[in-house]
Image (cartoon, helix red, strand yellow):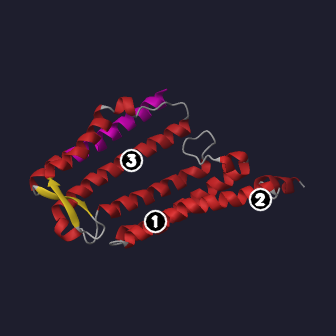
Amino acid sequence: MRKVKKVNKIVKVFYVIFGSFPLLVTLYMYPLIPNNIPIHYWMNGTIDRWGSKNELLIVPIIIFLLFVILQPKLFSLSLNSESEDRITRWNNYYFLIILNILVYTNIYISLNYETCLDSFNFYNFFACAICFLFGFLGNYIPNCKRTSSFSIRNKYTLENHIIWSKTHRFCGLLWFTGSIVFFPMLLFSHNYYLLIIIIFMLCIFFLSPIIYMKYLHDKYIKGELEDSSHRKRFQHSH
């Protein structure tokens, strides 16, 4: 019980700090921001819509309301499963940090849009956030249980525990290593090369597990799918 209270206290402090910073930083930088700022632009840095700098306050206010004012009701831990609560907690951490970076990125672009949009813009940040999310999931998913809400649940993985185990280990390795490879490419890509790379990355991350699951399913139907850990134990016993 003491451990639960300590974890909840740490979570609350984290939410208060990172839930307040975006609004505080925005208010601090507000006088320095031009009255008219780019609201929407393309990957090549071409601005197609302008707006008031007051729009920069919308996201920080929402973050403050969700994670500081309403967080006891929205993000309290259920504690029904320690592993589930842990991954949920880290997902919330990641989501909040991404929102923080989004706010700071918008402030930076509002101040430097004349020089920065042709080399780095929101799309770079968004692509890197997706890439990092796959890396985060890849680190967790090999060890998830069938009851986990973050697992890959379909007719292939649920029909056999070997397919379940191999698929999740495959996705973990693919997503974690793939995120390391694609992250710098997404960070420094310009114009529509960024779009091509992120589409290519998502195709690999989604299509490869489907192909692999179908391959394992076919082996299972033919009776060729064997648990390597069981085979090792059998050989060791002899």
Q: Where in the figure is residue 227, as x and y percent of width and height?
A: 77, 54
Q: How many marks?
A: 3
Say if residue 236 shows up in the picture. yes
Q: Is residue 146 above or below residue 183?
A: above
Instruction: Tell me which secondary structure the magenta stretch mostly adopts.
Output: helix
Q: Residue at x 79, y 55 (%)?
A: 221
Q: Residue at x 50, y 40 (%)?
A: 86
Of tags 1 and 3, the one toward the viewer is 1
Asked if the residues shown at circle 3 and circle 2 are in contact, with their CB atoms under 8 angstroms apart, the answer is no
Q: Residue furthest top?
A: 1
**Which label's residue is closer to the chain start, 3 or 2?**
3
**Which label's residue is closer to the chain start, 2 or 1?**
1
Q: Is residue 112 magenta?
A: no
Q: Which label was assigned to residue 95?
A: 3
Q: Where in the figure is residue 166, as x and y percent of width and height?
A: 68, 55
In front of the other: 101 or 160: 160
Residue denoted by label 1: 199
In terms of secondary structure, where does tag 1 sit? Answer: helix
Asked if the residues shown at circle 2 and circle 1 are in contact, with their CB atoms under 8 angstroms apart, the answer is no
